[in-house]
């Protein structure tokens, strides 16, 4: 006589735990959805993601959601480890609570040795305790789930620490200049900008690409090279280039005095971008001025000279003045203002983030957990328990996953179990037992 969990009324303990986990995640997702809808309608626009992240990391409601999620992940991993590592209970109710169980008449001759030998042929290592015993395979199958959960938990903590303990500083430097970043002096030794000599701007779309920017820096730990790619680490700091522009020197000639020179950093790239600077005591709006207009059919575009740029300087109350830059520093048509000595500047960002190492570690754990989950179907927990009852022997079987296949496997074992328990001195040999008697899974 066999019984499976599908034939018994009531919930299996594992199903109860799974239902509890599912209900916890459902409640959490509903809470996050409600909070997300609130934030979406409360904060709209380009800052929606930043506002949502701030809501989670700073507001009491967001912190409560994170705490509930962390507790659910922690308790879920603990329950998974306990379930996989726990030893079976030698009671009839426990055996019958497995995925499937069967009852066989008790033979007159000793039978535990024959049943143990049969389990060994199946690839199990039986543990006997008198006229009862068990065998468990895959007791470490909780590792993928626990690794993945711990990685997610570490990621949440790393994001929280990064949000509250992250320090960031920015400065604009030209070649040879020194600035302070996070309290440490940083010197820009050399700046290389591989920009095109000319650029044709068609329409309003900005199709200018700033590439090939390389900065040679020197801080208290020594020299380092920073590019537009991944940030470069120096000690506990990370350096990155976040912008580049022209460091332009302007000259103003006055009849009653010598020429005056002033150098300003112009943030006018890509072409079409405007910047406001203080020039000779006046606030001026500066933008790149096209060298000429190119037309072809219905299309027209503006050609900008990037190697020797021209600038349009505008004030609110005056008409704009065009200043052209040439190697000789020639004056513009007005004769009062001229520009020369075009160079580049770089906007450098320095970040100190103690949560970054936790985020990197969590991503590694999450990747390892997903990889282990993909292989877990080959070494998940399988449990066989047998006990002696009232003139009967009860054998139960359970699998962590693929329970339907496990029940079908036990059905195929029934004939062999009946033969062993009817004639304990006879155990199916490897040839007669087929692939399963040789320990192979079918």
Image (cartoon, rainbow, N blue to C red):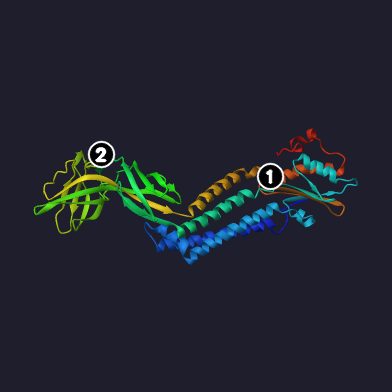
Judge by depth and name the residue closer to the eye, 372 or 354: 354
Mark 1 crowd level (few <14, some 14–19, many ≥20, 10 Å Cα): few
Is residue 24 left or right of 341 when viewed as pictured? right
Q: Residue furthest right?
A: 108
Is residue 59 left or right of 389 when viewed as pictured? left
- Residue 425 spot, x, y in % from top left: 88, 40
- Residue 52 spot, x, y in % from top left: 44, 60
Instruction: Identify the residue at horizontal 53%, vertical 51% (top origin).
Output: 362
Eye-nearest disc, 2 or 1 = 2
What whole-number distance in Å separates the C-alpha atoms at marks 2 and 1? 69 Å
Contact between labelled residues 1 and 2, with CB atoms less than 8 Å apart: no
Placement of the C terminus among the 4 image quadrants: top right
SS class, disc 2: loop
Res 405 label? 1
Residue that mark 2 sits on? 197
Displayed quadrant of residue 16: bottom right
Q: Residue furthest top?
A: 431
Instruction: Identify the residue at horizontal 79%, vertical 34% (top origin).
Output: 430
Is residue 230 left or right of 373 when viewed as pictured? left
- Residue 313 spot, x, y in % from top left: 18, 52
Is residue 66 left or right of 245 when viewed as pictured? right
SS class, disc 1: helix
Instruction: Identify the residue at horizontal 70%, vertical 59% (top origin).
Output: 10
* Between discs 2 and 1, the one toward the N terminus: 2
Displayed quadrant of residue 55: bottom left
Q: Is residue 343 visible?
A: yes
């Amino acid at each position: 006589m066999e019984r499976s969990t599908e034939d018994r009324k009531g919930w299996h303990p594992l199903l109860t735990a799974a239902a509890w986990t599912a209900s916890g995640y459902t409640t959490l997702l509903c809470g996050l959805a409600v909070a997300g809808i609130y934030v979406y309608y409360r904060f709209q626009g380009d800052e929606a993601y930043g506002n949502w992240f701030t809501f989670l990391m700073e507001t009491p409601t967001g912190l409560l959601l994170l705490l509930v999620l962390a507790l659910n992940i922690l308790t879920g991993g603990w329950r998974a480890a306990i379930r996989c590592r726990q030893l079976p209970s030698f009671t009839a109710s426990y055996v019958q609570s497995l995925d499937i169980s069967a009852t066989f008449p008790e033979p007159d001759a000793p039978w535990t040795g024959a049943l143990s030998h049969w389990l060994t042929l199946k690839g199990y290592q039986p543990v006997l305790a008198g006229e009862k015993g068990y065998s468990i395979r895959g007791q470490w199958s909780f590792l993928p789930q626990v690794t993945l959960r711990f990685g997610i938990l570490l990621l949440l903590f790393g994001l929280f620490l990064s949000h509250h303990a992250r320090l960031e500083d920015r400065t604009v430097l030209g070649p040879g200049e020194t600035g302070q970043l996070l309290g440490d002096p940083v010197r820009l030794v050399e700046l290389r900008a591989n920009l095109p000599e000319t650029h044709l701007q068609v329409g309003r779309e900005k199709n200018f690409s700033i590439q090939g920017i390389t900065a040679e820096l020197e801080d208290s730990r020594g020299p380092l090279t920073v590019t537009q790619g991944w940030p470069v680490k120096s000690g506990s700091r990370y350096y990155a280039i976040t912008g580049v522009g022209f460091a332009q020197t302007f000259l103003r000639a006055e009849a009653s005095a010598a020429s005056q020179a002033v150098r300003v950093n112009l943030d006018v790239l890509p072409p079409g971008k405007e910047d406001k600077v203080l020039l000779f005591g006046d606030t001026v709006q500066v933008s790149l001025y096209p060298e000429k207009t190119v037309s072809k059919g219905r299309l027209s575009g503006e050609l900008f000279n990037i190697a020797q740029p021209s600038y349009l300087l505008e004030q609110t109350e005056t008409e704009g003045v065009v200043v052209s830059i040439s190697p000789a520093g020639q004056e513009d048509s007005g004769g009062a203002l001229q520009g020369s000595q075009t160079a580049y500047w770089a906007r450098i960002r320095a970040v100190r983030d103690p949560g970054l190492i936790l985020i990197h570690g969590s991503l590694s754990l999450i990747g390892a957990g997903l990889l282990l989950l993909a292989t877990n179907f080959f070494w998940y927990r399988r449990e066989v328990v047998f006990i002696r009852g009232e003139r009967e022997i009860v054998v139960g079987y359970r699998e962590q996953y693929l329970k339907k296949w496990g029940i079908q496997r036990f059905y195929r074992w029934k004939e062999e179990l009946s033969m062993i328990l009817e004639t304990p001195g006879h155990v199916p040999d490897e040839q007669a037992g087929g692939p399963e008697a040789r320990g192979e899974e079918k």
